[in-house]
Structure formats: structure tokens, C-alpha cells
Image (spheres, rainbow, N blue to C red):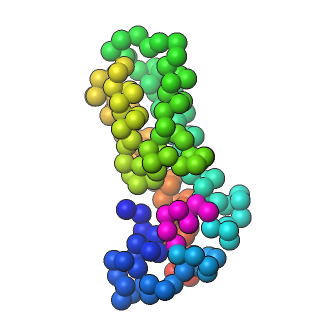
Amino acid sequence: MLLTLTTLQKRKPHLYNPSWPCSQCNSSPETLNHLWTCPYILPEFSPLNTFKTLLLDLQTVYLVKFLFAIPLKSLPDSFVAKFMAIDCWDCDPFSNSCLRFARELIPMSLTNFLGTYFSLFIIWSIINTPLHDFHFDFYVQIWLYRSVFFHH
């Protein structure tokens, strides 16, 4: 679970007053949904836009790596279109599958699709490092910034 203020308030109410709102807008509880839509954040610094950019980069890296991987059976001409249409890439609005990436989980829709063409060994060997990089960038570009701001 991501450490939003509401999560911290539930875990340690003696440290985080349950009545505290979002530290940036001071108008709403800081939930995961609020993180993406806080009106205080300028559009170019929006966690939503940052997440979308990181997710698009992850999608591109995965697609390239899988196109050059050795499949169990030949990839159909529709592979790219079907890969791009997996619900884990939908973030307008966010699909539950898409939010799994934010929660450091791998969406089943992605692994189920890839499992029809690649061995589990190939899938995990390709998914592992880019997903780690995605989570690191997600932490640095979204969570670290918010944590520093909150503690300030």
C-alpha cells in the first residue's frame, strides 16, 4: 500500500492527526485518488501526468523487448495492437489493472496475454528490471517529492 497521509493516519494516529487534510491543498483527505487530482498541483508537475509518462515509457520498453524475444509460437500481426489494448495501460480514467503498477503489483491482464506467446521464464526475465526501474522512478518523481514537501 502506498503511504498517503490517510494511510499514515490509520497506521499511526498518535503521530498523524486524523483531521489533517492534504498538505498541499488543505481541502481534502490525501487518499490515493486525491494524489492524482489535487487542485494545488500545477499540470506540468501533476503526479497523474508523471504516472502516465512513466507508464507509457514502461509500455514502450516492454513492447520492444517482447517483440525481440523468442516466442513459443509466432507472433500474429495483431500482437502490437492487442498488447497496446491491454487494460493495464488504461489511465483515462485509471483501470484497476493500471493502478496495480502503482501498488507494485503486476497486472494479471498483462501476464495472461503474454502467457499465450511466451514462456514464464521469458515473461519474468523481461518484466523484472523495467518494472523495478518504473517503481524507482515512481518513488523518486512522485513519492519522494511529496514526502519532502509534507515534512517541510
Is 43 positioned to the left or the right of 133 in the image?
right
Picture coordinates of residue 106 (x, y %)? Answer: 37, 43
Task: Give the mark count.
Answer: 0
Q: Is residue 133 visible?
A: no
Residue at image location 44% in from the left, 14% down from the top? 75
Q: Quadrant of the N terminus?
A: bottom left
Picture coordinates of residue 28 (x, y %)? Answer: 57, 76
Q: Quadrant of the C terminus?
A: bottom right
67 lies above or below 135: above
| Helix, strand or loop: magenta stretch | helix
22 lies above or below 136: below
Is 40 positioned to the left or the right of 89 in the image?
right
92 lies above or below 6: above
Point out the stretch of residues depicted in magenta.
30-37
Residue at image location 36% in from the left, 77% down from the top? 10
Residue at image location 71% in from the left, 58% down from the top? 44
Residue at image location 32% in from the left, 34% down from the top? 124
Is 119 positioned to the left or the right of 66 in the image?
left
Picture coordinates of residue 13 (x, y %)? Answer: 37, 85
Q: Is residue 51 visible?
A: yes
Q: Nearer the viewer, residue 83 or 119?
A: 83
Picture coordinates of residue 112 (x, y %)? Answer: 35, 30
54 lies above or below 44: above
Residue 22 is inside the magenta segment: no
